[in-house]
Amino acid sequence: MNPEDEGKGPATPGGSHLRGELLQQAVEVLQAGIFIYTLEGKLVDVNETACRLHGWTREQMLAMSPAEFIDPSTYHVFDEFRQVVARGEEFRGLARGKRSDGTTFEAGVHGVPVTLDGRVYAFGSVRDVTEEQALREKVAQSQRMEALGRLAGSVAHDFNNLLTVIRLNTEVARASDDPQRVRTRLRSIDEATSRAESITSQLLSFSRTRPIQEELLSVREVVESLVPILERLLPDAVHLRLDLSTELSAVLGSRRALEQIVLNLVVNARDAMRDGGEVVVRAQPVPEGVSMEIVDQGIGMDPETLRRAFEPFFSTKGSEGTGLGLATVVGAVEQLRGTLDVESEPERGTRFRIELPASIAGLATEKDSRSQPPQVDRPLAGRTILVVDDDGLLRRAVCAGLERYGAVALEAAPSEAEGRLADSAIDTLICDVFMPEVSGPALVERVHRSRPDLPVLFVSGFAGAEAGDARMLAKPFSLRQLVGALLEL
């Protein structure tokens, strides 16, 4: 600070004193929190809105590290913000801010580089978008449920087909004395159950509400997993084509956000092609990540419609549309720290382009080994396992599978379970989570009072079922998965 500036308060980077005062006044009246950082990440100025947002005074915040008012779960957003601005580019993203009382809020972040006195700074604005994010989540859930309503008839049709396959093959196998023919029928039953499992898994994943959780995502895998649902949402006259590179980088983000982008844009393309056509979902590698495109051959948009396309509640579908589909896409793209662009002309279709940044971490791939039995012939030999479930058919099927791998397997209805567990020979419990007579966790809590060391494996067919720290296995499961889970207890 120059001597003549003493008494004028903290120095503000750049310009004359008058310019500094005008800039300071403009910054203070903004409704967003303003932060000015060096490119090394040191905070050099904030406005009063930022102070109110976080609950500290200006003097306190200037003495703090940014890590003290950013939730640890989104430190990476701050690093990306600085890196993008240092390249001379504009940054938009979502983070989570931390207040002085320990609470957090969802923060929409916008950053640009500014040059003051020949030095480049990172100029960032932050808005509390907690309510906006909650609204988007409600809209997204509503849209998922609407889509599920449309899917119900198609899914019932598919399940009736699969049940017919299982029943007919079972009857043929029971009537046959030829072992080879029985094995062939059993393979057909196994294939039908795998298809049924795929449908239920898709529906549960798609419909349930769950907390936003970031994970490493394979764009190709997520898109391909949505195909059964997408195909049911499209009329016969609209064809879905995938063009997905096998060389895509992993991206970090919410799987639900990526699913929402694909679903909403494909449905948008469907609605734009009343007379049919082709919608293409394309994903290709780009230097900094993954570029996705959803392209249709529909009616397109004129310049005025294109300008307003992402406005909440703006719709060209009259009473049929909510006007929130594309606004939801914008929020989902922000969650994934991506960018969204659109090109469209009347009668020439529309192209949405989303660019997602690659994660610096690698993507672990998992091999599907459902049909591969454990390598040891009788890995459960010497164990006595009680299976508790309200479905008798399921209990007996599980017991048969456990006996195949060496266990002594017993079964009990929920009302019988406590009495059976008085037998000290039972050394493991498999228990359903949701049962009509008593919940699995409540039953286990009572049993653990007398047998605190009894190992428990919970199983459930409900999406989002929880059992504290206990091991959980989702239905449907294979024998290999069941035996593997038991060996980990």
Image (cartoon, rainbow, N blue to C red):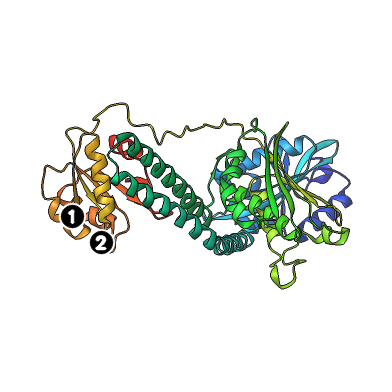
Amino acid under disc 2: Val
Q: What number is the disc on residue 438?
A: 2
Q: Which mark is residue 129?
A: none
Q: Quadrant of the C terminus?
A: top left
Which corner quadrant of the image does residue 269 belong to?
A: bottom right
* Marks 1,2: beta carbons within 8 A: yes
Residue, far top? 375
Q: Say whether residue 117 is left or right of residue 85.
A: right
Residue on which disc 1 sits: 417
Q: Earlier in the sequence, mark 1 or mark 2?
A: 1
Determine if residue 6 is in view: yes
- Which image quadrant is residue 3 in? top right
Q: Picture coordinates of residue 479 (x, y %)?
A: 33, 39
Residue 207: percent from left, percent from top? 52, 57
Residue at x 62% of width, y 57% of height: 233
| Residue 310 in sight here | no
Q: Residues under labels 1 and 2: Cα distance? A: 10 Å
In the image: residue 317, left or right of residue 484: right
Pointer 1 local density, CA inside 10 Å: few below 14, some 14–19, many at least 20: many
Q: Position of residue 236 (x, y in %)?
A: 66, 56
- Position of the N terminus, as image quadrant, is top right
Under circle 1, the secondary element is helix
